Image (tube, rainbow, N blue to C red):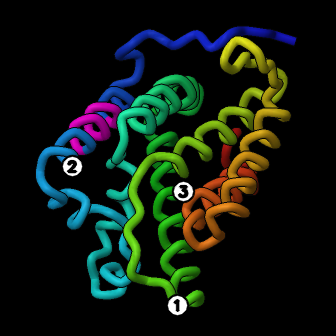
């Protein structure tokens, strides 16, 4: 079984990942400086999606509202996204991630409508991060990764750790609030294996 620590890939190894990181960093910083305009226009707001603002189904993960979440999201995109883009090719990686982002957003919009809670805004890359980790763990099930220098998990255990961590937050914050993350986890976990490996 191959073991490695949390070693980052070479910067610029994937042009798609570099563009994704630049967009996330740029929009997140702009969102902090513009008085709320970027968030009001790009966040996932179910009530606005119902009014035809369908671009929100794609743009919501590109805005992080805190410095720690921005750093963590960028590290996850860089670390796990680069491996997946290299393994799958950038075209397939982009297709799979767009499917996941849009599907998680649509599920969130539907769940919020059923729950009668459509006046909230969601942004951030937590859901995307969860999906990337699970996709990576499914693609590299026997490889091990050490988190924070103290917790070593194989790909399979990393999947269960991610699912458990997100579920715990959903118990405390509520399933509607955590709908994008729960949907992303489920979508990545149940994504057909034959499509991942073809």
Q: What residue is pinned by disc 3?
A: 100
The outermost residue toward the left is 34
Residue 36 at x, y percent in the picture: 18, 59
- Mark 1 or 3, nearer chain start: 3
Residue 22 lies in magenta, yes or no? Answer: yes
Residue 13, how many percent across, how many down? 41, 16
Q: Which residue is mark 1?
A: 116
Is residue 6 or residue 143 the one in the foreground?
Answer: 6
Marks 1 and 2, how far apart at CA: 28 Å
Would you say 7 lies left or right of 166 here? left
User: How far, Cα to Cα, is label 3 from label 2?
Assistant: 24 Å
In the drawing, does residue 38 fall left or right of residue 164? left
Q: Earlier in the sequence, mark 1 or mark 2?
A: 2
State whether the magenta stretch is mostly helix, strand or loop: helix
Is residue 191 something one can see in this rendering? Answer: no
Drawn side of residue 172 relative to residue 143, left or right: left
Q: Nearer the viewer, residue 82 or 183?
A: 183
Check disc 1: other Cα within 10 Å, few if <14, some if 14-19, many if 20+.
few
- How far across and down, in percent of the image, does residue 71 sit? 42, 29
Residue contact at pointers 1 and 2, CB within 8 angstroms: no
Residue density around tag 2, few if under 14, some if 14–19, many if 20 or more, within 10 Å: some
Quarter occupied by residue 84: top right
Secondary structure under badge 2? helix
Relative height, residue 37 to residue 13 (above, below)? below
For the point 67% across and 49% down, which residue is it?
195
Q: Which residue is mark 2?
A: 31
Q: Work out whether 102 lies above or below 130.
A: below
Tell me the magenta residue range.
Answer: 20-27
């Amino acid at each position: 079984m191959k073991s490695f620590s949390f070693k980052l890939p070479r910067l610029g190894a994937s042009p798609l990942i570099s563009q994704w990181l630049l967009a996330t960093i740029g929009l997140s910083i702009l969102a902090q400086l513009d008085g709320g305009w970027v968030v009001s226009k790009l966040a996932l707001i179910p009530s606005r999606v119902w009014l035809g603002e369908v671009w929100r189904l794609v743009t919501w993960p590109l805005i992080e509202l805190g410095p720690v979440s921005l750093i963590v999201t960028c590290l996850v995109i860089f670390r796990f996204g680069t491996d997946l883009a290299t393994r799958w090719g950038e075209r397939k990686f982009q297709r799979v991630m767009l499917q996941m982002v849009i599907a998680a957003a649509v599920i969130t919009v539907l769940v919020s409508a059923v729950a009668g809670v459509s006046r909230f805004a969601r942004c951030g890359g937590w859901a995307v991060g969860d999906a990337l980790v699970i996709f990576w763990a499914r693609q590299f099930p026997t490889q091990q990764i050490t988190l924070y220098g103290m917790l070593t998990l194989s790909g399979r255990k990393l999947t269960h750790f991610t699912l458990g961590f997100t579920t715990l937050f959903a118990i405390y914050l509520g399933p509607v609030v955590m709908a994008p993350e729960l949907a992303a986890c489920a979508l990545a976990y149940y994504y057909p294996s034959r499509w991942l490996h073809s």
